[in-house]
Image (cartoon, rainbow, N blue to C red):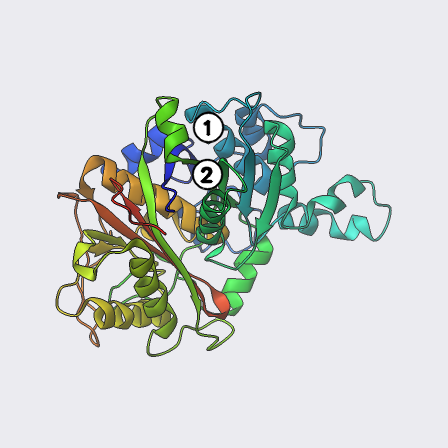
Amino acid sequence: MSVPVVVTGIGIISSIGTDFEETKLSLLNKKTGITPVSILNTRHKDFVLGEVKKTQAGLHHLAGTNPDEAWTRTALLAIIAASEAVADAALNQNDSYKTGIVSASTVGGMDKSEQYYKDFIAEAKHKKYIDTHHAGNHTEKIAEKLGITDYLTTISTACSSSLNSIMSGVRLIKNGLLDRVVVGGADALSKFTLNGFNTLMILDKEHCRPFDESRRGLNLGEGAAYLVLEREDLALEQGKKIYAYVSGYANANDAHHQTASSGDGKGPYLAMKQALGKAGLQPADIDYINVHGTGTENNDLTESIALKRLFGDQLPPFSSTKAFTGHTLGAAGVIESIFSIIALQEQKLLPNINFKKKIRETGLVPVTDIQSATIEHVLTNSFGFGGNDSSLIFSSHHKNLAK
C-alpha cells in the first residue's frame, strides 16, 4: 500500500539567507551570495565563494549554542537550519510518534581539524575537537539538541549526499520504521575543500556560469538545509501545512570515474528515468527541472546529454541555481530541493543567472529570468563524485504516485 510522504517543515541557511524567508526573497530578486573571500582563512583571496557571512561567534549567537563547547562550523550551520525546520513543522517530541534524523555531510568537521591538527599531535590543548572531525558529528549534535532519539544516521556520498538523505527518510517512513524524519545536510567551507577543488582545476575565479559555453568551473559555497518529512495522514490529522509531496526518487551509479561524469550521461539519465518511474509520471509531466549544473565543462555537458536523451525535443524549462549559493557539496541536494519547493509554492521558474551563450554540442537554453508558470511536478538533480547520481521529484498533490 502506498504511503504518501509530505514536507511539513523547512529550514535553511546559506550565502543568500539565514532563514527560509530571506532565502526566498534573494532567489526571487536574483540576488547572488557569491562574493570575494572574507570569512575563510585562506591565502587564496583571488577566488569568489558562497560564504555565510557570519564568524564562529556569529553562528553561535544565531544557534543559541555555548561557544565553550566543541562545535564545528558545519555543526553550527546544521543546528540553525534543523531548528528552523523542526519549529516550522511544530514537532512535539513528547507525543507517541517515532521521529528520526538522516543528515549528510562531505566535509564534516574539517574546519576545526585543519585549524588544530598540529596541536592534536603536540600538546592537544584543543583535543575536544578530535571527535568532531567525522561526518556524523553534526548529526549527533542535532539529535542531542533537538531531542531526537528514535533513529539517526549520516550519509556521505559526495555531492548527492543530502538528496540521498531525503530518499532514505522517505523509505524509513514508507516501510513503517518512522512516522516522521528530519532530513538534510550541512557543509562548511574549509581550506581543505578549496585547495582540493583547486587541485582538480575545476574552480572558476569569476562568478560561475552553469550551462554556458564559456563555463570554466564552479564556485564553492557553504550552508545547511533540512526538511521535515511526515506521513500524509499524520500531517492532515494535525492540520499542518503541506509544502509538497515527495513523489519520486532514484539513485544510480555509472561507476565511470572518480570525479568525472560518463560521457553519455548514463548515470544522470538512469537516475531521472527511474525517479519518474517511481512517481508513475511521464517526462511530459515534469514542469521544471532544477539541474545539478555546477558550471564545470564535464558536468554541464553530460547532464545536457542526459536531459536530451530522456526528454528529447520536449525538454521542460530548467535552470541551475548554483550561481546563487555556490556548490555547497553535501548540502547542495537539500538546498536545491528547497529551491524546487519554492518554485512549486510560488508557481515561478527560477533563473539560471550569468548565462549568455548555449553549449555548442547540445544547444540547450536554461531559464534566465523569473517566470510565472503552472507547476505541479519539479525534478531536482544532484550528481556526485564516483558517479553517485540522484534525482528526486516534488509534487503539489498526490495521486497514488509513489510506491
Q: Would you say residue 209 is visible in this rendering?
A: no
| Helix, strand or loop for disc 1 | helix
At 33% from the left and 27% from the top, the residue drawn is 241
The quarter of the picture where residue 231 lies is top left
Q: Which residue is mark 2?
A: 226
Establish if 10 lies above or below 121: above
Which residue is painted at 45% across and 51% down in the image? 167
Question: Measured from the top left, where is residue 309 in percent x and y?
Answer: 24, 73
Residue 84: give its label. Answer: 1
Residue 32 lies, in percent from the top left, at 32, 43
Tag 1: residue type? Glu
User: Are the residues tagged 1 and 2 within 8 Å (C-beta)?
Assistant: yes
Instruction: Tell me which numbered mark, 1 or 2, is placed earlier along the sequence.
Output: 1
Q: Quadrant of residue 227?
A: top left
Outermost residue to the right: 123
- Residue 286: quarter of image: bottom left
